[in-house]
Amino acid sequence: MPLQRGDSPLNTTLGKFVANIGYGGIRGGVLLANTLVLTPILISRLGRDQFAILALVTPFLRYGFNGVFDLGLATGLVRFLSRDFASGDHASINRYCTSSFWLYVTAGASLLVLYQLASPSLLHSLLGLDVRLYVTAQTALRQFLWIYAILLLSNPFFALLMGVQKVHLSHVVGTVSLLIELIGILVLVPLGITLSRVVFVYAVGAIVCALLCVILAYYHFPHLRLRLQSVSGRSILDLAHYTTRWSVTVSTSLLAPVIDKLILARFVGLSYVAIYEAAAKLIEILKRATQLLLLPIFPLAGAALANQTKEQRQAFYQRVFGANLVLSAGLYLIPMTVIFGIMRIWLGPELSGPAGWAFVVLSSTGFMLALVTPAALILAGTGRMRLLVTTGLTALSLNLFLSSILAKHLGFRGLLAGTALAYVGQSLLILVGLQRWKEFTLNVRSFIRMGLVVVCGAVVPGLVLVAIFGREPGAAKLVALGAAEIAIYCAALFTFEDNRKLAVIVTMHGRKIVGAWLVGRRTGQISQG
């Protein structure tokens, strides 16, 4: 019997999570390959100083939620589009999309003009580089700003895909971008890698991904009409009001590594920017893996707010929080125990020490921030952001001022200490503040018990194994140690009945999706859901 649209397992809430994990898993695999292959190549071919300059300008290579100077506009757009899509209001969707498109045109033009006016004095005071490196940095930043302007224009279409519950397609765009980066830079290896040639590869990727966002948006939402008369003052005010509040939270999460690298360039040196960037790239992979689980929460929260009771929202949050705790502990804490051996093989003995400590601090901080991500996405999707704004401002201020002082006097370790204090403190404040709301209330006893088992299961076996086999084993031993740690961790998790039940449910749902896809292939009626 042919599959009907409503029968597709992908149309269920769990189906959206499973699809996001599947598509995002491919994207994460390509990102991992990019990081492991390209980072040592770029460091060795460009040199640490030019690689550091590349690290300082790469924030302009992201679209959507990851755009550093988007400041939450894409997030706000997803929130309103998911709400209107749930109610079938196509006219409102067109107003928001058109209005946001022209807002992005204005934002891109403003960034380019502002750079021309401010760059001569701003760059020199921020970076403190010598004349040769200053000119290189100025040229690279100008080029990447043009690339970022292209990516800004793709944001309305990216947000539309998210808003109409096509979260997995955002991973398709991201995967294409990463493949262009990987293949393009590898092609440059025999020709010679220079900063300008690397910029060209990223420009090609930006153009292709912007076009792909447009094509996918029109295909999956054929009602889209970007007409000048659809620009709405009310829509612009809604987006501006949301962005003003959400920008603090976005700045906290996205600008943190940018601020850290600027502080290092100013007070410590470009070599340490390169070391920080290598560790931060690994952390970015872990963050993307977390998104595989959590990204669908945002549009779902905005669409479901009016249709659920507080008890239903609380049950949903507790399930997601528990799954996220398990995933995040495995992702962030297990690698910490073997990271010095990994860095020695990946970057060489000279960089393995400082890069390893950078990873330990950033991974611990990333784990704490990951714990509050489900609540942050739900609050953002439902427009309640006072707690996020206040804690975000506190963390951003601490990171900016405390890290600067510590880096000036203590160097690289001071910077890492300031970052950890700022963002671990932010996470704790959010977790405590959330307990005032019924829908975010956790069973403290159950949470502590689960947390101890999860954290100890992720860290203790690794520390014991590393103590037995040495801190810097060879590649084969590292693989064996990692496999043993994961096996022990999974065994610890399955001591909880809820985890065993969840694993069975996800496995069964995954089988249903694969079965539906195979049936659709045989009948020629694959569901578009």
Image: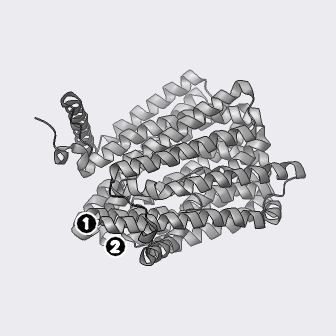
Q: Residues within 10 Å of mark 1 (few under 14, many from 20)?
A: few
**In the rendered structure, are the residues bearing label 1 and label 2 in contact, judged by CB atoms less than 8 Å apart?**
no
The total number of labels drawn is 2
Q: What's the mark number on residue 437?
A: 2
Q: Residue at x 75, y 54 (%)?
A: 264
Residue 139 locus on image (x, y percent)? 77, 51
- Looking at the rendered structure, the secondary structure element under dot 1 is helix
Q: Residues within 10 Å of mark 2 (few under 14, many from 20)?
A: few
Residue 464 locus on image (x, y percent)? 52, 35
Residue 154 locus on image (x, y percent)? 51, 54
Distance between the Cα atoms at labels 1 and 2?
27 Å
How was this image coloured? Answer: one colour
Q: Quadrant of residue 126?
A: bottom right
Position of 505 relative to 263 (above/below): above
Q: Which part of the image, by quadrant, shows the N terminus? A: top left
Is residue 126 visible to the viewer in this orientation of the structure? yes
Q: Nearer the viewer, residue 75 or 218?
A: 218
Is residue 379 visible to the viewer in this orientation of the structure? no
Q: What's the mark number on residue 54?
A: none
Q: What's the mark number on residue 87?
A: 1
| Three-letter code, disc 1 | Ser
Residue, far left: 1
- Looking at the rendered structure, the secondary structure element under dot 2 is loop
Q: Quadrant of residue 47?
A: top right
Q: Nearer the viewer, residue 348 or 481?
A: 348
Q: Residue at x 27, y 63 (%)?
A: 86
Which one is closest to the eye, mark 1 or mark 2? 1
| Three-letter code, disc 2 | Trp
Quick check: 333 left or right of 221? right
